[in-house]
Image: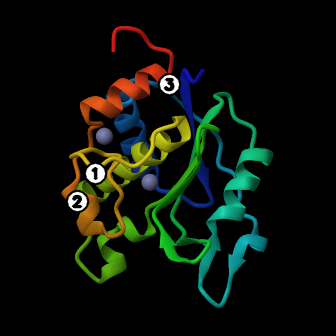
Amino acid sequence: MFRAVSLVPLGNVRQDVIDAVAGGIYEHLELEVYFEPPAPLPEKFFDPMRGQFKADDLITYFQQNVETRARLKLGITAVDLYAWDLNFVFGISILKQGTSIVSYRRLDNTFYHLPPNDRLLYERVTKEALHELGHAIGLDHCEAPCVMHYSNSVLEVDAKPVKFCPNCWRRLNLLLGRQGA
Ligand SMILES: [Zn+2]
Ligand SMILES: [Zn+2]
């Protein structure tokens, strides 16, 4: 069972972003958060032609090689990620295995040459972190207004709520072995 989440900065990560994600996990997942020391991003997962890291390889490495206090762990990174045949991903998870990574590179307005907006960045990264942790715990995508709704653009991220819908929340509590859900 998962009782807490370990947050691991992968590479150079803004502390205010980590704090925002920690607050969101505490509030919306009701799990304790452990702040872990940063882990380096191995160069071998970087594709210089694309300027991106390969998320599917990175998460396998993260699962197997980065020790954390909690079994449920979330890597947070500022670098851009791609996976499989996708041009980019906001995040990636190993379903039910308790391992997730979220990238805020494309959740930041500055990526789209728009003025920076920290409040919006915190909200987006919190949503995508909760979404990936939902997968890591065992939730699938959801069609309801729900943080588990699939998002392929920041507009879709902005359109969905930060909360789990009642169905996903019930399932999540069952998966976490929590009573009274
Ligand atoms: Zn998803
Ligand atoms: Zn849902």
Task: Please tell me whether mark 2 sits on a helix, a strand or a loop.
Answer: helix
Picture disc at residue 175: 3
- Check the image and report above or below for 59 versus 142: below
Mark earlier in primary sequence (2, 1): 1
Task: Please provide percent x and percent y for residue 22.
Answer: 42, 37
Give the residue drawn at x 64%, y 28%. 70
Task: Please provide percent x and percent y for residue 103.
Answer: 49, 61
For disc 1, the neighbor class at 10 Å (few under 14, some 14 to 19, many from 20) is many
Picture disc at residue 158: 2
Task: Please provide percent x and percent y for residue 115.
Answer: 23, 75
User: Where's the N terminus, which quadrant?
Assistant: top right
For disc 2, the neighbor class at 10 Å (few under 14, some 14 to 19, many from 20) is some
Q: Tell me, yes or no, whether the two marked residues, 2 and 1, touch with CB atoms within 8 Å.
A: yes
Left or right for 55, reference 173: right
Give the residue drawn at x 75%, y 38%. 67
Given the current orientation, which residue lies at the most extreme bottom position? 49
Q: Tell me, yes or no, whether the two marked residues, 1 and 3, touch with CB atoms within 8 Å.
A: no
Give the residue drawn at x 54%, y 69%. 79
Q: Amino acid at mark 2?
A: Asp
Q: Quarter-wise, where is residue 41 in the image?
A: bottom right
Which of the two residues, 16 or 112, is positioned nearer the viewer here?
Answer: 112
Mark earlier in primary sequence (3, 2): 2
Task: Please tell me whether mark 1 sits on a helix, a strand or a loop.
Answer: helix
Q: Nearer the observer, disc 1 or disc 3? A: 3
Q: In whole angstroms, how far apart are the C-alphas of marks 3 and 2?
A: 27 Å
Give the residue drawn at x 23%, y 68%. 155
Picture disc at residue 123: 1
Q: Amino acid at mark 3?
A: Leu
Q: In whole angstroms, how far apart are the C-alphas of marks 1 and 3?
A: 25 Å
Q: Nearer the observer, disc 2 or disc 1? A: 2
